[in-house]
Image (cartoon, rainbow, N blue to C red):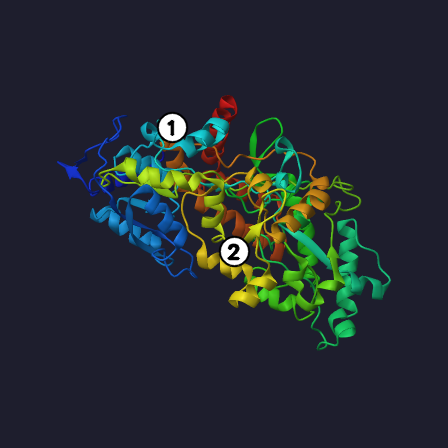
Amino acid sequence: MKKSVKRVCAAALAGAMILLLPGCENGLVSNVNDGTVNQNTDQTDFYIMGGQSALSAGYDDLEVLNALQENAGIHINWETMSDSLSEQVNIRITGGQLPDAFQGVGFSNYDLARYGDDGTFLDLTPYLTPDIMPNLCAILESHPEIRAAVTMEDGGIYGLPSGEQMTTAGIGADMDDAYSIFSVPQYSMINKAWLDDLGLEIPTSLDELHDVLKAFKDNDMSAKYYGNAAGSTIPMTTGFDEWCWGQNIFYSGFGFTNWPNDVCNDLHLKSDGTVEFVCVTDAYRDCLTYFHDWYAEGLMDTEMFSQSDSQLIAKCQQGYVGVSTWWYIEELMGEYADDYVFLPPLTGPKGTEYEGTCNVTIRPGSPISSGQLCITNKCESPINLLKFYDQWYDGETVMQLQYGPKGVFFTGQEEGTGMWLSITDEEAREKYGKSAGELRNLYEVYGPKLILAEYYNDVFYMEDRAIERLTDLDTFWMPYVQDTTFYPVDCVFTGMEMETIDWHKSDFETSVREQEGLWLKEGGPTDEEWEAYKKRLSDKCGMDDLLEVYQSAYDRYSAAE
């Protein structure tokens, strides 16, 4: 991999920043990560800084947290916030005003490796023993993949693991064959009442959907069927490359769905173990050329590139829209929901090499990370603090930290199974004047919460909406997935690789996104434009360097399995 002048400069700047970190002596940080356990247990009063939900009143009066502190024989002084968290954390680190731990910040692997290497964050590996952290050690013993996911290249673990394994195992699938709730993020839907009124069938191909959307537009179905203002019909509206409300599901007729991705947008792992960027494939080019015609005909919302999710919802709930994307029909369509059904992924255009093609590519689930709880070198008694956090790795405890306490969010245990039952929306509104989701946000604690798939079988039931979404995923969308290979979100990168990603990823993704939007709106690309685009991504946006990094990291990951 070539080392560009920009990258050398970035490395030099990073080195200069290290000299400003706390604990410096003669420009160097004294590294406390020597592989030994600090046996001091005198400290019982701790100061912790971190994030919280915008609806949370803070952690001082949360009964669950206070009981955990009492059990561990410690007291925590909390400084939590929902706004400006990153800015305040950076000020504390660079200014030398460290708390005993950062909780719910979400440090990246790059941050963990950097602050672990200079001694700002403690290496917790020596403390992961049955006498200090029995709950977590039992989990790591039965889930070695979790330990691998939070272990940095140097062998250190600079934060406690967190993640949520919400999969189809929670609705009865075998653990080994389960898929994450995030596997297919966009569920497409169509107004069946409009179809029936026009005597049309649910489309099965892109060409058929094109004709249906044209019929919606030509007959002004919003006005005709719902009595809205003339010309109010929007045949299809989505966001652009957005999470659950983007246009990407409609690309399946060209053999791919380039979902927004936790790893890198447009990155695709092929079944042979090699990685590629979909955005430079011929299928991607043909796809944009095809959908430009839809845009030019007024079948796709002209505001799709700029609208917010709330604007999308407002259009749908006024009866203007024929086709859109979201997780739940009821949530998106409001009082018109009964008129809609799911629109399946569609086959490619007739007369092309994509005719009959339909492939939904899946994306990784929620990552296992260690950026939610990091103990700093200011902490005098890590053992005492870690014994407090080890309680978080109990199933009934973490369910309360994630959703709310027993007797509030969890209303009781099911007779026979002992499974905890959560409050319904109706019950929450009647008793607390809030929805179940709002109640959860009020009590949720950010931090190292590890919710294992098995908890949904032996500790507590998923929320009804999660069960609904997973059921739809399993029965309606997964049958359109030809290959379940995906790039693992838990790949661990070296320091140099993280520097490369940090330097290039944002520019690369932005350039691809902007060009995709431009071609959809204005048409193209010509042969000349296509070659210039690929050259720009390679020469200016680091595409080749990124590809090499992701391939190397995956090769190490697969070799260690």
- The type of residue carrying mark 1 is Pro
Secondary structure at numbered mark 2: loop
328 w.r.t. 471: above or below: below
233 w.r.t. 109: above or below: below
Q: Is residue 16 left or right of residue 556?
A: left
Looking at this view, name the residue that lies furthest to the front. Answer: 415
Q: As rendered, which of 50 and 421 lies closer to the eye?
A: 421
| Residue 514: percent from left, percent from top | 52, 52
Looking at this view, name the residue that lies furthest to the right. Answer: 199
Dot placed on the residue nearer the N-terminal end, 1 or 2: 1
In the rendered structure, find residue 409 and report the number of the disc placed on it: 2
Residue under pointer 1 = 130
Q: Is residue 16 visible?
A: yes
Q: Residue at x 34, y 41 (%)?
A: 388
| Residue 3: percent from left, percent from top | 36, 32
Secondary structure at numbered mark 1: loop
- The type of residue carrying mark 2 is Phe
Looking at this view, name the residue that lies furthest to the top. Answer: 559
Q: As rendered, which of 354 and 389 lies closer to the eye?
A: 389
